[in-house]
């Protein structure tokens, strides 16, 4: 019988109970064994949704438990590094919520430690499995756009007030929507185009009383391509998620991947037969000149598949598949974020030095 890996989940706020626990619980090779649940509402939710899981108050109760095979760090960004390091030192495989760490040096240290101990280390860059990004990748790979010269991707929100007590609103290491939403966009861009030649950024604090970045634009430069990654908290009307411009035309995609809203509503992949399927109204439009003719067509979206992340974790541990999200890739995302902050501080383009 195949081994069933026991998961210790550190963090049961939105990240833990929306983006990790459902996919862990539905994977028949994984067991949601222990979960940190400190607040009464978290303890109640854990008992209702995962009655077999053991609720604990301390991360140490998970890291030091010999029964735990994999530690999942789904906490505030400022403690990703310290908790991941403690778990690796305790001999656990580790999955870290994005962003991986707050500095490149921290990421490199964790990568070296995992290799030294022959342990799996991955980062939850789950936006790779979103329907919209999978569709964008398919369109680019088809070659119908020709040489891509401009790539724009956005994660916009509208909240013109601050949430009391929210760590994301505090001026802490790894705070700001460039580390939160921007990390997704950077990872997606690096998957499509590789490492850039240079980085230029505009990082602003716009809302009344805000303490950390709530509006960003990060431009990655390549020899024949400009990549513009944007996010803001004051977008009242929906903006295109993706707009890709090539020598033959463009592809523009509105709407967001449906998986997050389902998960927030308590719906799991096995609860429905159309998991990850987008509404036709959200299909992107491909508008190109092809064979001397103007063509404008709606492109059916690929199916979102967040469950693929943990399926790959199991397959990698079994030795059957390479790890999809390599920690070195996640470290490169942090490097881009560091260069973006340097660019804004120094008001200049910063070269990406590829070691």
Image (cartoon, rainbow, N blue to C red):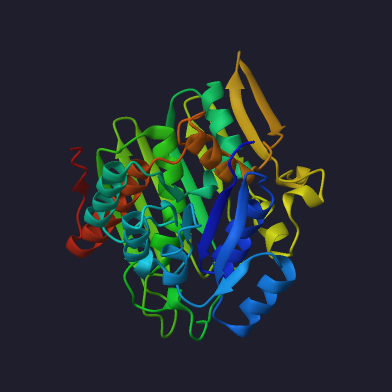
Residue at image coords 46%, 75%:
58
Res. 116 in view: yes
Q: Is residue 323 left or right of residue 332?
A: right
Looking at the rendering, which quadrant does residue 224 occupy? top left
Please tell me whether residue 340 is drawn above or below residue 250 in the rendered image: below
Of residues 197 and 45, which is closer to you in this image? 45
Q: Quadrant of residue 3?
A: top right
Q: Can you give x and y, in whole percent of width and height, for residue 121 in the image?
A: 39, 47
In this rendering, the answer to whether 51 lies above or below 149 is below
| 253 to the left or right of 227 | right
Percent across and percent down for residue 207 are 44, 79
Residue 246 spot, x, y in % from top left: 48, 29
Which residue occupies the foreground of this view, 34 or 103?
34
338 to the left or right of 177: left
User: What residue is at 48 percent from the left and 63 percent from the top?
Assistant: 74
Q: Is residue 251 visible?
A: no
Residue in front for this viewpoint, 31 or 196: 31
Q: What residue is shown at x 67% (from left), y 36% (from top)?
A: 302
């Amino acid at each position: 019988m195949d081994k069933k890996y026991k998961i210790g989940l550190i963090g049961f706020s939105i990240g833990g109970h929306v983006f990790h626990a459902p996919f862990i619980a539905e994977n028949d090779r994984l067991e949601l064994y222990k979960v940190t649940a400190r607040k009464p509402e978290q303890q109640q939710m854990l008992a209702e949704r995962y009655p077999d899981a053991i609720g604990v108050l301390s991360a140490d109760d998970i890291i030091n438990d010999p029964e735990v095979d994999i530690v999942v760090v789904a906490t505030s960004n400022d403690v990703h590094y310290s908790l991941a390091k403690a778990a690796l030192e305790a001999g656990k495989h580790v999955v870290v919520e994005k962003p991986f760490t707050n500095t490149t040096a921290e990421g490199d240290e964790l990568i070296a430690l995992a290799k030294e101990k022959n342990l799996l280390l991955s980062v939850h860059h789950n936006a790779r499995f979103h329907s919209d990004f999978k569709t964008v990748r398919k369109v680019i790979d088809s070659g119908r756009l020709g040489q891509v010269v401009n790539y724009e991707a956005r994660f916009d929100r509208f909240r013109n007030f601050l949430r009391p007590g929210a760590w994301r609103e505090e001026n802490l290491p790894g705070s700001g929507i460039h580390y939160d939403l921007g990390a997704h966009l950077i990872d997606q861009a690096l998957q499509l185009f590789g490492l850039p030649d240079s980085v230029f950024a505009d990082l602003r604090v716009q809302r009344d009383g805000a303490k950390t970045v709530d509006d960003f634009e990060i431009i990655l430069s390549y020899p024949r391509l400009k990549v513009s990654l944007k996010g803001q908290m004051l977008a009242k009307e929906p903006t295109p998620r993706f707009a890709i411009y090539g020598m033959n035309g463009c592809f523009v995609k509105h709407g967001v991947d449906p998986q997050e809203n389902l998960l927030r509503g308590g719906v799991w992949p096995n609860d429905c037969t159309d998991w990850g399927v987008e509404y036709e109204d959200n299909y992107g439009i491909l508008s190109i000149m092809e064979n001397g003719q103007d063509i404008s067509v709606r492109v059916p979206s690929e199916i979102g598949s967040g469950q693929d992340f943990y399926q790959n974790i199991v397959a990698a541990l079994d030795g059957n598949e390479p790890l999809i999200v390599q920690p070195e890739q996640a470290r490169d995302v942090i490097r881009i974020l560091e260069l973006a902050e340097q660019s804004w501080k120094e008001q200049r383009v910063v070269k990406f030095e590829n070691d």
